[in-house]
């Protein structure tokens, strides 16, 4: 794989593997659960993985900015200073903390890289499934065993699909999502935790659509999946159909879409209707 971001991707892959060890060590214990706010759990795994990932990225690329969930900027001024760096890492140390606390395996570790061109590289590690998704927009997307036991396989999202299966939230079912799916004619849904895991289902062609037409996601949820979906030939956008602004506010106010190029216009029509 030839890519402009090979150096960053190598470090991202190695760091995700190292962070997996930290996360799974906590997963094997009777850990405690804290709350950052209402319905917003956090554990020692989130904090320790966040610290490790940020340390590794900063040591390898001191000139890059880092925006991570468990060490988020204190205010807009700090966020703007970090966001002004030419290349930005976005880190979600445990995407799907609720699923982590329930020990159902539906969580992942995500590291994304963005530039002025948007998300350009991403890594999503799914420990319980022993999968590491990685890639770049210009070099393609791949999946390999997280434990290194086998070769990487390329991923491709077909531009058109004969059927549409949608991955939906396992813990936060949404009537708004259901209404959109009904307009498109989706009859098969796949409940799943974590934004990254939902994107992985689309990457592996186990689903053709992930649409989340409401608040709740942040840029560190979007960056790695965005790069991977696009690297595999698909599209990931804000609900408006526009690209994400990785220089802007961290919160994604209106939701996101991950799907094929052929299905996106139908999804947008259903949303606008």
Image: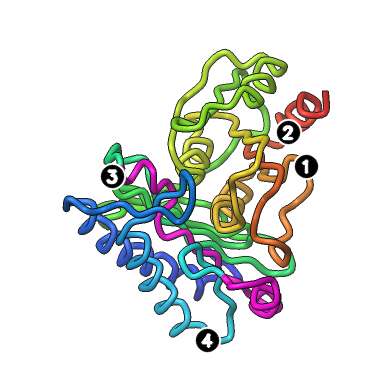
Q: Are marks 2 and 1 in contact (CB under 8 Å)?
A: yes
In the image, 121: left or right of 76? left
As helix, strand or loop, the secondary structure at mark 1 comes to: loop
Based on the picture, tell me whether residue 99 belongs to the magenta stretch: yes
Q: Is residue 164 above or below residue 91?
A: above
Q: Which residue is mark 3?
A: 128
As helix, strand or loop, the secondary structure at mark 3 comes to: helix
Q: Which residue is mark 4?
A: 62
Q: Which residue is mark 1?
A: 241
In the image, 134: left or right of 174? left
**Residue stretch in magenta:** 73-101
Based on the picture, tell me whether residue 45 belongs to the magenta stretch: no
Q: CA distance from mark 3 to mark 4?
A: 32 Å
Q: CA distance from mark 2 to mark 3?
A: 30 Å
**Which comes sooner in the sequence, label 3 or label 1?**
3
Residue found 59% across the figure and 34% down from its top: 210
Residue found 44% across the figure and 51% down from its top: 95
Q: Is residue 271 above or below residue 116?
A: above
| Quarter of the image where one finds residue 136 | bottom right
As helix, strand or loop, the secondary structure at mark 2 comes to: helix
């Amino acid at each position: 794989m030839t890519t402009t971001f090979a150096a960053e991707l190598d470090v991202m892959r190695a760091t995700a593997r190292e962070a997996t060890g930290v996360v799974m060590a906590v997963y094997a214990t009777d850990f405690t659960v804290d709350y950052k706010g209402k319905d917003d759990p956090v554990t020692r795994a989130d904090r320790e993985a966040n610290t490790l990932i940020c340390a590794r990225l900063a040591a390898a690329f001191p000139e890059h900015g880092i925006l991570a969930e468990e060490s988020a900027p204190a205010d807009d001024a700090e966020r703007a200073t970090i966001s002004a760096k030419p290349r930005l890492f976005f880190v979600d140390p445990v995407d799907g903390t609720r699923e982590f606390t329930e020990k159902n395996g539906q969580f992942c570790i995500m590291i994304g890289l963005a530039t002025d061109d948007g998300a350009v590289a991403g890594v999503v590690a799914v420990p319980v499934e022993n999968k590491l998704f990685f890639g770049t927009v210009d070099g393609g997307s791949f999946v390999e065993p997280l434990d290194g036991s086998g070769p990487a396989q390329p991923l491709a999202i077909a531009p058109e699909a004969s059927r549409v299966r949608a991955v939906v939230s396992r813990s936060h079912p949404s009537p708004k999502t259901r209404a959109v799916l009904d307009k498109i004619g989706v009859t098969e849904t796949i409940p799943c935790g974590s934004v990254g895991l939902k994107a992985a289902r689309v990457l592996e062609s186990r689903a053709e659509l992930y649409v989340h037409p409401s608040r709740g996601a942040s840029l560190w949820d979007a960056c790695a999946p965005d790069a991977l979906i696009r690297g595999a030939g698909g599209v990931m956008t804000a609900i408006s159909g526009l690209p994400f602004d990785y220089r802007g506010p961290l919160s994604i106010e209106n939701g996101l879409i991950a799907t094929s190029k052929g299905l996106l216009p139908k999804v947008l029509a259903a949303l606008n209707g």
